[in-house]
Amino acid sequence: QDFPKHRGKGYGEMGIIAHALAHSRLLKEATHVFKITGRYFVANAASLVRCVDEADPVPDIVCDLRENLTIADSRWFAGTLAFFREHLVPQREMIDDTVDIFFEHALARAVHSAMATGMGWRLPAASARLVGITATTNLPIAIGPGKRIRHRMKNWLFRY
């Protein structure tokens, strides 16, 4: 990857996404893209995909917004090709680790931008059961039952 290293791994990750969107024949046929951080496995991926496919209406974006809607959980999220191309990738230039603006901020801003144009957002119907190693700490990811329960409560409140 050829970019200033101070931009951080999120800047590089956004470049990878842009490259995949521009060059993948498989993605050209997709309705939604499901993005998972590279060192994780989603144990309940099939049920999360079904939640998107079976939603009525099918959302343009599925992700968890946090911290007063200023960041999004980027470990697992989904969106239409239009969301990725028109809203997410254009946010790449805002990412800069030296000023504490990360991929998660760019993703949240992309969600807000997309909703402003009429795209539909939805909180994931269930918490992703992630298995793997975090890139930041190089330690196993820990998502216990407490986080899953909080996610269910948050989902219920958003739908209320």
Image (cartoon, rainbow, N blue to C red):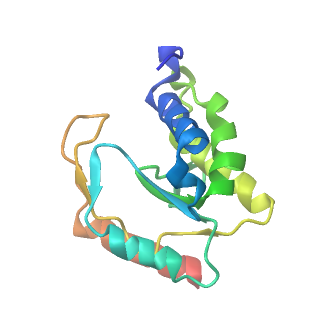
- Furthest residue toward left: 140
Give me the residue at 63% from left, 56% from top.
Answer: 81
Residue 61: horizontal and vertical position, in percent?
Answer: 60, 63
- Furthest residue toward right: 117
- The mark tally for this picture is 0
Give me the residue at 58% from left, 30% from top.
Answer: 95
Q: Nearer the viewer, residue 136 or 100?
A: 136
Is residue 12 something that shows in the picture? yes
Q: Nearer the viewer, residue 145 or 122?
A: 122
Residue 137: horizontal and vertical position, in percent?
Answer: 26, 34
Instruction: Give the side of residue 75 with respect to residue 143, left or right.
Output: right
Give me the residue at 52% from left, 35% from top.
Answer: 102
Q: Is residue 18 above or below residue 115?
A: above
- Furthest residue toward front: 25
Q: Is residue 6 above or below residue 105?
A: above
Q: Is residue 9 above or below residue 157?
A: above
Instruction: Give the side of residue 34 with respect to residue 57, left or right.
Output: left
Quadrant containing the C terminus is bottom right
Quadrant of residue 136 in the image?
A: top left
Is residue 67 something that shows in the picture? no
Q: Nearer the viewer, residue 107 or 30?
A: 30
Residue 21: horizontal and vertical position, in percent?
Answer: 58, 44
Quadrant of residue 126 in the image?
A: bottom left
Q: Is residue 150 above or below residue 115?
A: below
Residue 16: horizontal and vertical position, in percent?
Answer: 50, 35
Q: Nearer the viewer, residue 149 or 85?
A: 85
Instruction: Give the side of residue 85 with respect to residue 73, left or right.
Output: right
Give me the residue at 54% from left, 49% from top.
Answer: 25
